[in-house]
Amino acid sequence: MTYFPGVPKIQYEGPKSRNPLAFRWYNPDEMIEGKSMKDHLRFSIVYWHTMRGTGSDPFGPGTAIRPWDDGSNSVDNALKRIEVAFEIFEKLQAPFYAWHDRDVSPEGSSLKETNANFDRIAKSLGEHQQKSGVKLLWGTANMFSHPRFMHGASTSCNADVFAFGAAQVKKAIEVTKQLGGENYVFWGGREGYQSLYNTDMKRELDHLARFFHMAVDYAKKIGFTGQFLIEPKPKEPTKHQYDSDAAACINFLRAYDLLPYFKLNLETNHATLAGHTMMHELDYAGHQGALGSIDANTGDLLLGWDTDQFPTDFYLTTQCMLAILKHGGIGKGGVNFDAKVRRESFEPIDLFHAHIGGMDAFARGLKIAAEIRKDGVVSDFIKQRYRSWDSGIGASIESGNESFESLEKYMLEKGDSAPNESGRQEMLENIINWYL
Ligand code: XLS
Ligand code: NI
Ligand code: NI
């Protein structure tokens, strides 16, 4: 049984290929810096956009044609979707996928029924993973769609909602463990606020930390060894999300003694909403030892919301891969396409074009980044730019041997600082263009 008779298993055909259903750059076994492309990139397909996206927007209902989906919330329909999903994963040669609990498994009329549904679904997911070799990159819990979470989940003013969220995450971690998930993600959902006139921010942050500690304790108890990840996002749906960017998340984790247990899952469109580049977020997390995984997508410069578009810009993917390679790779994480086709791209085949483009863009970015690194022009420039710190007074400051008094003495003797040198930004931008 095939749901996509016109789509072959997508193969690498090289940059000259004009076949829209082929990879031009993603060549899974090609070695880059001593590692295969497949292992560098660890591509992952998300269940929520690819299997559950309908193309609806605030101005109109869904447009997507998905002939296999009867539109119902039944377990049978959910089981059918799994068949389709794994055909997509396999045809795209994606080694991983990711879900929210409610993407794969419908909510029942009670928590008990919801959990029973999830057990049936998990069994089928496990069988499909086994058969295809596709693995679970991460699981997460959707605690933002159901109306009970209108005030947030772990940061709700309603203690019962916190309790419901705890029960939901407990189950989601159990199923993630059962399916061999390599990570477990917390994205803030509605963990934030719209107005301080009705919000006790300190209390909500304390509750968020309490919730994470419970998750850490439970993971230890059941022997879940996957990596916990927090996914920063500054706004949408709330005006102020508590996990706004990499620096804010790391500060929160450190303040509440959670840093040893968490890394970050960074998303391009979230970085830009926070007023940062993705490269900034990756580098910040990287030098704090917190680079866990990425949600690969892009926003639109002219639109100020989380448009979750597929990444196709080689400059963007080159920057991502430069930062990732610099920090030693993505580890247990992956390049997870948290991206959706446009509302106007309503046919099933568009799902393939979209992922092929994203995978090729990252493969190309990886190759370009590796070339830039091999030549070393940029890294040599940076090293040279900071050379005053490698010896003399710079080295002495870095090793903690100087004080305001000693530096005043040094400067009084010297009279003035050494002359500055140009930052050469334009030259470096030109150099990057040599490789593209
Ligand atoms: C929403 C987030 C979400 C997370 C998973 O903006 O990107 O999709 O990745 O909960
Ligand atoms: Ni995301
Ligand atoms: Ni997002």
Image (cartoon, grey):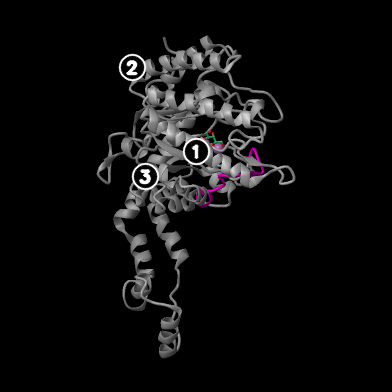
Q: Determine if the magenta segment contains residue 48.
A: no
Q: Amino acid at mark 2?
A: Lys
* Neighbour tally class for label 2: few under 14, some 14-19, many 20 plus, Cα within 10 Å: few
Between disc 3 and disc 1, the foreground one is 1
Any part of residue 343 in sight? no
Which range of residues does the magenta coloring cover?
236-248
Q: Which mark is residue 212?
A: 1
Q: Secondary structure at mark 3?
A: helix
In which of the image's four quarters is ligand 1 placed?
A: top right
Q: Which mark is residue 131?
A: 2
Front-most of residues 148 and 31? 148
Task: For marks 2 and 1, give the CA distance.
Answer: 34 Å
Quarter of the image with the N terminus in it:
top left
In this view, 99 is above or below 244: above
Q: Position of residue 30 (x, y in %)?
A: 28, 38
Q: Amino acid at mark 1?
A: Phe
Front-most of residues 302 and 191? 191
Q: Amino acid at mark 3?
A: Leu
**Quarter where residue 109 is shown:** top right
Q: Which residue is mark 3?
A: 366
Give the mark nearest the N terminus, 2 or 3: 2
